[in-house]
Amino acid sequence: MQSRMRELALFNLGIDSKLRGCELVSLKVRDICHGDQVATRAVVMQHKTQRPVHFEITLATREAVQK
């Protein structure tokens, strides 16, 4: 997985957030980053239920997204 950083970042975000796959791939950088830093927490609206999902972004996920 080290050579496939996008997949690793999406996999880790999926574990952290428990979002559906379609919601993961539609995430924008601004949804999880503040400037050039990856946020420690994020809020994303679910497509199906239109409810906000609050989740913490772990260190491993932040490192994968940063790369």
Image (cartoon, helix red, strand yellow):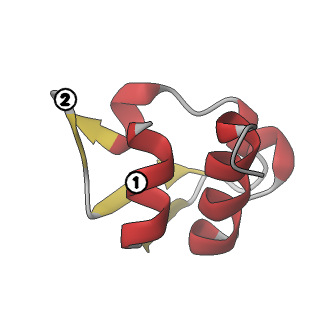
Q: Is residue 3 left or right of residue 56?
A: right
Q: Amino acid at mark 1?
A: Glu
x, y (%) of residue 33? Answer: 29, 38
Q: Of 50 and 35, which appears nearest the observer?
A: 35
> In the rendered image, which residue does mark 2 sit on?
36
Query: In this figure, what is the number of numbered marks?
Result: 2
Residue sitting at x 72%, y 56%: 49
The residue drawn where x is 50% and y is 26% is 28
Eye-nearest disc, 1 or 2: 1
**Seen from this angle, which residue lies furthest front?**
3
- The residue at the far right in this view is 21
User: In x, y percent, where is residue 55?
Assistant: 44, 71
* Residue neighbourhood size for the residue with mark 1, other residues' Cα within 10 Å, grouped as few (<14), some (14–19), many (≥20): few
Most foreground residue, 25 or 5: 5
Q: Circle 1 is placed at which residue position?
A: 63
Q: Which secondary structure lies at badge 2?
A: loop
Q: CA distance from mark 1 to mark 2?
A: 12 Å
Q: From the viewer's perspective, is residue 22 above or below residue 2?
A: above
Q: Does residue 5 appear in this view?
A: yes
Q: Quadrant of the C terminus?
A: top left
Which amino acid, by three-letter code, is at mark 2?
Asp
Side (left or right) of 14 relative to 36: right
Hey, which quadrant is residue 11 in on the image? Answer: bottom right
Q: Does any portion of residue 57 appear in the rendered image?
A: no
User: Does residue 46 sit above or below 23 in this rendering?
Assistant: below
**Occupied quadrant, residue 18:** bottom right
> Residue at the location (72% across, 43% down)?
23
Q: Is residue 6 left or right of residue 48?
A: left
